[in-house]
Image (tube, rainbow, N blue to C red):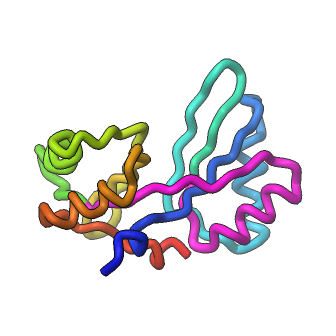
Amino acid sequence: MKTEDYIIKQISVFSENRPGRLAAIAKAMEEEEINIFAFSIAEAKGFGVVRVLVDRPKDALDKLVNIGFMVSFTDVIAVSMHDVPGGLYEIANILAKSEINIEYSYAYSGKEAAVLILRVDQAEEAVQRLLDNGANLLKSEMFA
């Protein structure tokens, strides 16, 4: 299995931080019947960055650009982690020992496991180190 098979295209949407912006993004996804798997919102001085994982990233990007949002793709990886105390530590410690920096992350809890989404400074190296240490990564095809 190639490391790039685990690199996922996350959509980053830059927007003014004001009422209705998240609703506009969600409505656009609804209109295109695009399923949102996970998202996070970060705020910085009046602007926000909405990060989303969807089932059809290219279609989502095109729709959001067409309605006036500034949008880009960002490479992330998704790790299924044990949903028990210490589950996060297992993953973070593998990356720490490998000198790989976690730039940001967010998580969601699914039916079978918790999933940690990671933006790291060395995506392919992180994938290889996590696989070498027995971590269960989600393939990018699950988000395309």
Magenta stretch contains residue 59: yes
Q: Residue 115: percent from the left, percent from the top?
A: 33, 58
The residue lying at 45 percent from left, 76 percent from top is 142
Which quarter of the figure has residue 62? bottom right
The residue lying at 35 percent from left, 70 percent from top is 3
In this rendering, the answer to whether 45 lies above or below 29 is above
Q: Residue 22: percent from the left, percent from the top?
A: 70, 44
Residue 74 relative to residue 65: left or right: left
Q: Residue 35: percent from the left, percent from the top?
A: 60, 69
The residue lying at 63 percent from left, 73 percent from top is 56
Residue 113 relative to residue 19: left or right: left
Magenta stretch contains residue 86: no
In this rendering, the answer to whether 41 lies above or below 25 is above
In this rendering, the answer to whether 32 lies above or below 127 is below
Q: Quadrant of the N terminus?
A: bottom left
Which quarter of the figure has residue 11? bottom right
Residue 12 relative to residue 98: left or right: right
Which region of the structure is painted magenta? Answer: 52-80
The residue lying at 21 percent from left, 66 percent from top is 131
Residue 44 relative to residue 103: left or right: right
Total numbered labels placed on residues in the image = 0
- 66, 123: nearer the viewer: 123
Q: Residue 93: percent from the left, percent from the top?
A: 16, 43
